[in-house]
Image: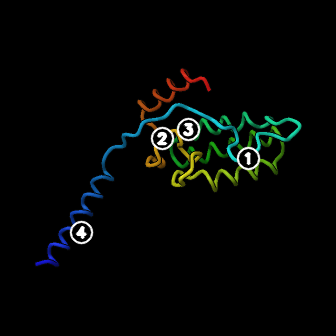
Amino acid sequence: MMQKLKWRGAVLVWLMGVSLLGCSYTGQLEPFRTDGCSSFPDGPPEEPERWRGCCVQHDRAYWIGGSSEQRRQADDELAICVEKAESKMLADVMWAGVRAGGSPYWFTEYRWSYGWPYTRGYRELTPEEEALAKALLEEGSW
């Protein structure tokens, strides 16, 4: 009898977990913020903000979030911008860094979709979420 109860309890816990995964996502997008190139210099000592604009654009894409393909596109655009601002070598280094460190599954502030709660993962924005993102960008003072 006790074995049957344990088994039923385990099945109940499993079913609850599966049903929670099926629930719609209700996280709220936080206002946009940027720290430039995060844990990387924003430029060389003689021009300390040379590629900062590239990083801010990249932060905006990460803030909004989206699919894994949209993340790759944001990372590729960062590399293109940094190559124009400095060099291919630096662009390759930064691209490798964001590819390794920007996963939505890392517990970091600068992960993919960092405007959203950690549990969002990769997910395309709904039309309502796109409208919210646009409104937050328009009212922001970043």
Query: Which residue is denoted by mark 4 in the rendering?
Result: 10
Tell me the quadrant of the picture where the C terminus can be found: top right
With respect to residue 12, does 124 lie above or below? Answer: above
Q: At label 4, which amino acid type do we have?
A: Ala
Query: Which residue is denoted by mark 1 in the rendering?
Result: 40
Name which quarter of the figure residue 32 lies in. Answer: top right
Per the image, label 1 sits on a secondary structure element best described as loop
Q: Is residue 101 left or right of residue 67?
A: right
Per the image, label 3 sits on a secondary structure element best described as helix
Q: CA distance from mark 3 to mark 4?
A: 38 Å
- Foreground residue, 5 or 16? 5
Name which quarter of the figure residue 9 lies in. Answer: bottom left
Q: CA distance from mark 2 to mark 1?
A: 23 Å
Neighbor class of circle 4 (other Cα within 10 Å; few <14, some 14-19, many 20+) is few
Neighbor class of circle 2 (other Cα within 10 Å; few <14, some 14-19, many 20+) is many
Q: CA distance from mark 2 to mark 3?
A: 7 Å
Q: Where residue 87 sits in the image (x, y, percent)?
A: 84, 45
Neighbor class of circle 1 (other Cα within 10 Å; few <14, some 14-19, many 20+) is few
| Tag shown at residue 63 | 3
Q: At label 1, which amino acid type do we have?
A: Phe
Q: CA distance from mark 3 to mark 1?
A: 18 Å
If you read the primary sequence from the N terminus, does the residue marked by circle 3 or circle 4 appear first?
4
If you read the primary sequence from the N terminus, does the residue marked by circle 3 or circle 1 appear first?
1
Per the image, label 2 sits on a secondary structure element best described as loop
| Tag shown at residue 116 | 2
If you read the primary sequence from the N terminus, does the residue marked by circle 2 or circle 3 appear first?
3
